[in-house]
Amino acid sequence: MWHAISSANIIVQLSLLTLVVMSVVTWAIIAQKRKQFRKVRQANEPFLDEFWRADSLDDIYEHISRYSDSPLANLFKDGYLELRKMADSNLAQKKGNDESGPLLTGIDNLERALRKATDSEIALLEHRLSFLATTGSSGPFIGLFGTVIGIMTAFQKIAQTGSANLAVVAPGISEALIATAVGLFAAIPASVFYNMYVANIRKLELDMQNFCADFLNIAKRNFFVDE
């Protein structure tokens, strides 16, 4: 096989080199994303346990640094800071008036903060997945391009020698088959893991949406006046 590659057409060699680089980067991304998703799962569960056990939002915020890998914790942090900012602004406007009961009116700012935080977390989870999608979709075509060049080389040899025996056509056919195999080797793992990771992200996105709804409900009950 190495002899076939070393003696292949320069275009076929460039195609193979491109596919090998894409494959190496693909496996590096697969390993990195697998580690990232494992950390997310391991951080989300204990954070949710603490979120529902805690006596107040302040207690949760005091320990938020423990869950830096949790998207849910990051949503809580952004939501909590926005809520506190709104409360501080409202207290400043009251200037010593009666401050008992719910402090705030209007929840749009909090909803926007949580929506923005959710978008940021999803973007982090999706980072580099586009390369897997590109490899999965273009890898077979790059391999096919090398295949076509290899077959063209085989036909040129037949034309030059006037013979179609195996010794003449074998090198070109070998180039073509190697290009096809390398293209599939790069594309198949990229497609499989891309779909797997996208499914994981959709599940995490649903978890984030549910958490935002729970956080907003808690905020409405404890900090906002019904409008």
Image: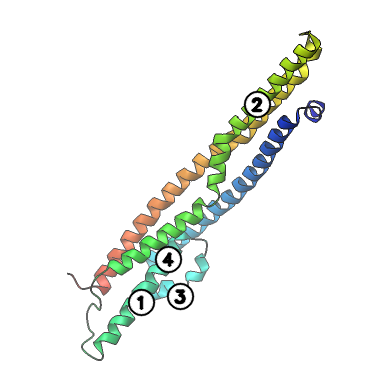
Q: State left or right for residue 84 relative to residue 149.
A: left
- Per the model, the C-alpha gap separating discs 4 and 2 is 52 Å
Q: Earlier in the sequence, mark 3 or mark 2?
A: 3
Identified by mark 4, the residue type is Glu
Identified by mark 3, the residue type is Glu
**Secondary element at tag 1:** helix
Q: Residue at x 71, y 35 (%)?
A: 14
Nearer the observer: mark 3 or 1; the answer is 1
- Where residue 45 appears, x then y in whole percent? 46, 58
Residue nearest the observer in this picture, 10 or 54: 10
- Per the model, the C-alpha gap separating discs 3 and 4 is 11 Å
Q: State left or right for residue 170 relative to residue 103.
A: right
Q: Earlier in the sequence, mark 2 or mark 1?
A: 1
Q: Earlier in the sequence, mark 3 or mark 4?
A: 4
Q: How is the image coloured?
A: rainbow
Disc marking residue 180: 2
- Per the model, the C-alpha gap separating discs 3 and 2 is 56 Å
- The residue pinned by badge 4 equals 50
Q: Earlier in the sequence, mark 1 or mark 4?
A: 4
Nearer the observer: mark 3 or 2; the answer is 2
* Residue 22 makes an appearance in the image: yes
- Quarter of the image with the N terminus is top right
- Per the model, the C-alpha gap separating discs 1 and 4 is 20 Å
Disc marking residue 84: 1
Q: Earlier in the sequence, mark 3 or mark 1?
A: 3
Residue at the bottom extreme? 96
Q: Residue at x 55, y 50 (%)?
A: 128
- Where residue 191 appears, x then y in whole percent? 54, 37
**Secondary element at tag 2:** helix
In this picture, is 65 found above or below 152?
below
- Quarter of the image with the C terminus is bottom left
